[in-house]
Image (spheres, rainbow, N blue to C red):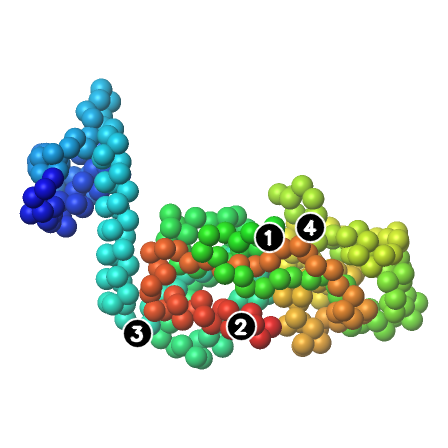
Amino acid sequence: MGNPSRLHFSLDLLKGFEAAARHLSFTRAANELSLTQSAISREIKLLESRLEVRLFNRIHRGLELTDAGLALYRSVSEALRLIDRGIEAVTEPAGGVVTITTNVPFASFWVVPRLPRFAALYPDISVRVAATNRVVNLEREQIDVGVRHISGGTLPPGAIELMTERLFPVCAPQLLRRRDRPLKKPEDLARHTLLLFSPDDMPQHWSDWPRWFEAMKLAGPAPAATLSFGHYDQVIQAALDGAGVALGRNLLVQRHLDGGTLVAPFGQDRSVAIGGRYVVTTAAYAAERPSVRVFVDWLLGEAATG
């Protein structure tokens, strides 16, 4: 491999190898690249000849990569991704579309209410919100930005901390005006309906009342009644409707507190940390796009200002 001229390969040749290695099939690679199977086969033979190394083993049911083939595939696929990202970065129009995924409550209560401010600042950039409570593979599903709630102290690779959360009781203001059921101190909760967040897919309630009572060093009073909901937005809607007292997540109820549709009967300082935080991650393919960088910077700025 001493002759450097052998290492000058056309981009088409490398794309053919990458597709064949990814599919482990010359036929599927040919279909993807709109070539014939024989053309892909010739390209692989040429590449193997110039490198003087076998890249594939022909086995009974198809192909497998040799050790050299696997090493080359990893390098070539990453190089092609970098090329694609570079082209996107310099050819993306002034605006563009940014797709963000996050859980349903955070999308409904935090992201969506702030989007008019983003639109006013960056009218040429469109935002698509893909709200889901499942964990999304950004690369596989072609989503640019992800905002997720995580537990533990270690950030995922490439993640940036957005904010932490705290819990405190909230209710509709009309509950404070009931003389027959005062709500001036935590012990008064025994006379009210407690609204519970009880998601089916979580073995333990990470935002439950016992945690709050324990943090306040109070014995949890037996409530007059309880209402349980599988989605957090339902909990808050019930609180807005005056159905009872909920544990508000500061990030998600602040808008209602500012607007007076919810109140914190004991003050926001009587709160407990959830033990997790929201982080923002960016898909590798989208990290260099100007519109994505603008949107992530805006998210961080919004989080910093509350």
- Compute the Cα span from label 1 to label 2: 23 Å
Q: CA distance from mark 4 to mark 2?
A: 25 Å
Residue located at (50% from left, 61% from top)? 160
Q: Mark 3 touching mark 4, by CB under 8 A?
A: no
Name the N-terminal-most of marks 3 and 4.
3
Instruction: Point out the tag, 3 or 2, that comes first from the N-terminus.
Output: 3
In this view, which residue lies farthest toward the right?
180
- The reply to whether the C-beta atoms of the residues labelled 1 and 3 are less than 8 Å apart is no
Q: Nearer the viewer, mark 1 or mark 3?
A: 1
Q: Which residue is mark 4?
A: 206
Q: Which residue is farthest bottom?
A: 120
Between 109 and 73, the one lying in front of the other is 73
* For residue 95, above or below residue 162: below
Tell me the quadrant of the picture where the N terminus can be found: top left
| Residue where numbered disc 1 is placed | 153
Amino acid of disc 2:
Glu
Percent across and percent down for residue 261 are 71, 73
Crowding at label 1, few (<14), some or many (≥20) Cα neighbours within 10 Å?
Answer: few
| Residue topped by disc 3 | 94
x then y, percent, for residue 219: 88, 53
Q: Is residue 123 left or right of residue 235?
A: left
Secondary element at image label 3: loop
In this rendering, does residue 100 appear at all?
yes
Task: Name the residue type under label 4.
Answer: Trp
Please report the residue visible at 69 percent of the width from the left and 73 percent of the height from the top: 257
Looking at the rendered structure, the kind of residue marked 1 is Gly
- Image marks 1 and 4: residues in contact by CB distance under 8 Å: no
- Where is mark 2, residue-wise? 302
The answer to whether one can see residue 237 in this image is no
The x and y percentages for residue 27 are 18, 34
Determine crowd level at label 2: few under 14, some 14-19, many 20+ residues with C-alpha closer than 10 A.
some
